[in-house]
């Protein structure tokens, strides 16, 4: 693990957010003064997930949903861990009046931004703040994801998406979320979820130093990158994930290994992209 990443993980969640605001302050001030930022694009210092171009990343995620999860303009979408609207922004131009979007996240600043800048313009886009504990993002509560019941009725959503969410959740939390997904997804619906997945080929890539990440702290069914900040980055054995899916009546219709492991020549994404369906 890099020295910068180790330093970053040594900060508290609030310190990480503050460090990003300070680092990007000159750029954000410049963009504000010269009106270079679009209305629904947040300042760089407020973006707390992912890296790279916010707008391009959102368009890329939407393209994955359309091509691999069958999202149509009239679909009903649930974005779990919606962050600060990275996917929601492009979907405002894709979903029609019959379509709808729901998103929730544990970082309140992101939800407040989305309600002010997106929901105010698109009433069929709704965002909820859910106060749950996470080593990387929120230590201000004791509420745990493994007990969280999604605030939605059964069989509501055509398309459910989790990008870089299960990569920051412990096994019990993931297990609960998979059960909730199985409950609220329509029988013909699809869930696009990204993971860091381990199998013999990928473990060999890591041991040979060919993978971009190394999950060196092994546990039963999963591995951690950092034992001090456990939810910083988590990788699951493919067999372990398969057992969890089976428990909840789900299956992995497709697994597209990502660029992080170096096993695919033309990966769909940096993380491993899975398409989950009801059995």
Image (spheres, helix red, strand yellow):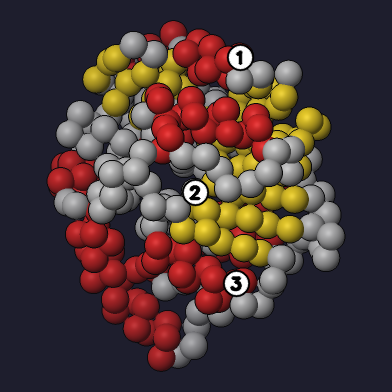
- Does residue 38 show up? no
Q: Is residue 239 above or below residue 4?
A: above
Of 44 and 229, the residue lying toward us? 229
Say which label, 1 or 3, has the lower sequence index: 3
Dividing the picture into quarters, in which one does residue 15 lie?
bottom left
Q: Which residue is mark 1?
A: 246
Say which label, 2 or 3, has the lower sequence index: 2
Q: Which residue is mark 3?
A: 118
Q: Residue at 26% of width from left, 32% of height from top?
A: 230
Question: SS class of the residue under badge 1?
Answer: helix
Of 183 and 271, the residue lying toward us? 183
Q: Quadrant of the C terminus?
A: top right
Query: Distance of mark 1 from mark 2, alpha carbons?
Result: 23 Å
Of 251 and 54, the residue lying toward us? 251
Question: SS class of the residue under badge 2?
Answer: loop
Q: Which residue is mark 2?
A: 81
Tag 2: Cα neighbours inside 10 Å, few (<14), some, or many (≥20)? many
Dividing the picture into quarters, in which one does residue 103 lie?
bottom right
Say which label, 1 or 2, has the lower sequence index: 2
Q: Is residue 98 rendered to the left or right of residue 227?
A: right
Q: Position of residue 98 (x, y in %)?
A: 84, 60
Q: Residue at 40% of width from left, 24% of height from top?
A: 171
């Amino acid at each position: 693990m890099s020295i910068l990443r180790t330093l970053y993980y040594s900060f508290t969640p609030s310190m990480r957010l503050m460090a990003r605001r300070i680092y990007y302050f000159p750029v954000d001030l410049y963009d504000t003064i010269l009106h270079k930022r679009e209305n629904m694009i947040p300042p760089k210092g407020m973006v707390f997930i992912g890296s790279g171009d916010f707008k391009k990343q959102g368009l890329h995620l939407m393209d994955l949903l359309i091509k691999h999860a069958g999202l149509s303009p009239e679909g009903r979408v649930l974005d779990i861990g919606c962050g600060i609207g990275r996917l929601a922004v492009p979907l405002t131009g894709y979903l029609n009046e019959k379509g709808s979007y729901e998103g929730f996240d544990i970082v309140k600043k992101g939800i407040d931004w989305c309600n002010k800048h997106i929901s105010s313009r698109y009433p069929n886009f709704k965002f909820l703040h859910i106060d749950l504990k996470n080593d990387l993002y929120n230590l201000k509560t004791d509420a745990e994801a493994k007990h969280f019941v999604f605030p939605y009725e059964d069989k509501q959503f055509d398309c459910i998406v989790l990008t870089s969410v299960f990569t920051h959740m412990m096994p019990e939390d993931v297990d609960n979320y998979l059960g909730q997904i199985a409950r609220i997804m329509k029988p013909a619906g699809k869930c696009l979820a990204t993971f860091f997945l381990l199998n013999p080929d990928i473990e060999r890539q890591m041991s040979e130093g060919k993978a971009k990440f190394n999950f060196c702290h092994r546990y039963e069914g999963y591995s951690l990158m950092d034992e001090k900040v456990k939810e910083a980055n988590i990788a699951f054995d493919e067999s372990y994930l398969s057992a969890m899916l089976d428990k909840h009546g789900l299956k992995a219709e497709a697994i597209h290994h990502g660029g992080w492991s170096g096993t695919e020549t033309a990966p769909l994404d940096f993380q491993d992209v899975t398409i989950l369906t009801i059995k």
